[in-house]
Image (cartoon, rainbow, N blue to C red):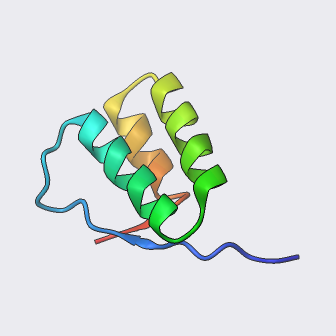
Amino acid sequence: MQTRVKPICQIVGIDGNVFVIIGRVAATLKEVGQREEAREFTARAFKATSYNAVLAMLSEYVDVC
């Protein structure tokens, strides 16, 4: 079984708007060739019920700095 490497995503210091964060995470995933993960994250994030849920979810896909 192959383990997916989580890319580092810079979200500290950017606009805290949830849509900006979703876009940054998706762009980071796409930059490292994880297009399917970017689509999956975006779909899940738009179904999330809160800002905190999106923040918790993004750590499943990227390492935040």
Q: Nearer the viewer, residue 31 or 15?
A: 31
Judging depth in this view, the residue of 25 and 48 nearest the camera is 25
x, y percentage for residue 48?
Answer: 48, 27
Q: Quadrant of the N terminus?
A: bottom right
Q: Residue at x 41, y 39 (%)?
A: 54
The structure residue drawn at horizontal position 24% and vertical position 59%, both measured from the top left corner, is 11
- The quarter of the picture where the C terminus appears is bottom left
Q: Seen from this angle, which residue lies furthest right?
A: 1
Q: In the picture, residue 3 is in which quadrant?
A: bottom right
Relative placement, left or right, of 5 versus 45 is right
Residue pictured at 33% horizontal, 32% vertical: 51
Side of 43 relative to 16 (left or right): right
x, y percentage for residue 44?
56, 34
In the image, taking residue 51 as reference, residue 59 lies left or right, namely right
State the residue in front, 24 or 60. 24
For this view, does 9 lie left or right of residue 62? Answer: left
Q: Position of residue 36 (x, y in %)?
A: 66, 51
> Viewer-proximal residue, 44 or 38?
38
Tell me which corner region of the image, top left, top right, bottom left or bottom right, holds residue 12: bottom left
**Number of numbered markers:** 0
Q: Residue at horizontal 35%, vertical 45%?
A: 23
Residue 17: percent from left, percent from top: 19, 36
Q: Is 39 drawn above or below residue 27 in the view shown?
A: above
